[in-house]
Amino acid sequence: MLTCFRLIKFFCLTLILLSTISNAKNLDQSVVEIADDIYSFSTNGEYISMFVITNNSVLVFETMNSHHAKAMVSKIKQITKKPIKFAFHSHNHWDHSSGGKVFLDEGASTVAHAEAAAWMKANPYKDMVAPTKIWSGNLKKFDLGGVQVELHYFGMNHGLGMTVFYLPQSKIAYIADIVTPKRIIFTVAPDFNLREWERSLTEVLKLDFDQAVYSHNEHKKPLHQGNKADVQSQLEYLRDLRFAFYAELKKGTNPILIPGIIKLPKYENWVGYNDWLAMNVWRVLTDEFMGPFPWRPETK
Ligand SMILES: [Zn+2]
């Protein structure tokens, strides 16, 4: 009888312990303070946003969708009573730029580059609303409640109006889609301009930052946190892919066979390597023969 009681007690304690660990993990996965008053936030580890608490308000970078946005607002309200003033969109794609209404309902303005804003207006989507503030050009600088914020547009690298957000005081950047640590290019590089993408990354590297929040990140430890080396790795992957394709072409290999031939073992541990590498090569191949631009080695 006593043994039975001890066993039940043991199982109860184990359950409590497991549930505590699981709660801690969930909390850890949803919000991480990466610097004073600067947080990365994710609902499922797939999509990651950033928010910043200033002297008098909260700034949000990347709304994603209403589900994600509502969870983020709820988390922000647990941390501060300050109002959310601005929610910034990185680019037009609906899987990033939806959910803006959640922030409008909070009294915030939503902000996007003119190219992204024009597309959002012209292509209504059920969870997406056009931004209430539009910026244009290559660079805008703001001081918002003592926090300097820079919006950088580096060109037509991915989607429309792709904006890299940079906080010079804390040396932190928020970068969507053009850098995804530890993952090769998603399938056939949808809506990417490979040549401009590569050039843009050389521009991103000129920004003086130590930490970065990436909208997608396959580095699991610690979740959310990235750095400048991730940009360099992304750039190297693009170059290695391109050079491998043109090395085969130069040998006289039938172009149609090249996607089945190329191996890049340096990246075999990156997500997507087995499934997408051939698709990545197909994309370089089609750019060479059809456009938008050949991405030859001499364009480095
Ligand atoms: Zn995108």
Image (tube, helix red, strand yellow):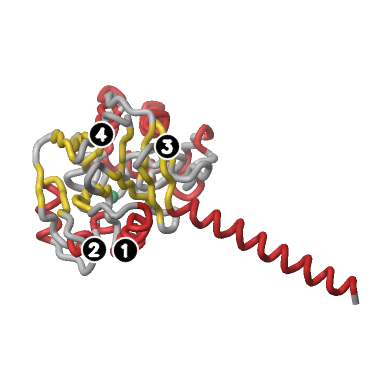
Observer able to see residue 240: no
- Tell which circle, 2 or 4, labels the residue nearer the N-terminal end: 2
Residue annotated with mark 3: 226
Could you classify mark 4 by the number of other residues whose Cα lies within 10 Å: few (under 14), some (14-19), or many (20 or more)?
many
- Tell which circle, 4 or 3, labels the residue nearer the N-terminal end: 4
Q: Where is residue 233 in the image (x, y as percent from the top left)?
A: 42, 31
> Would the CB of label 2 be found within 8 Å of ligand 1?
no
Q: Which amino acid does label 3 sit on?
A: Gly
User: Mark 2 against mark 3, which lies toward the viewer?
Assistant: 2
Residue annotated with mark 2: 102
Residue annotated with mark 1: 70
Q: Does the CB distance between marks 2 and 3 fall below 8 Å?
A: no
- Tell which circle, 1 or 4, labels the residue nearer the N-terminal end: 1
Q: Does the CB distance between marks 1 and 2 fall below 8 Å?
A: yes
Please tell me the numbered disc located at residue 195. Answer: 4
- In this rendering, would 183 be left or right of 134? right
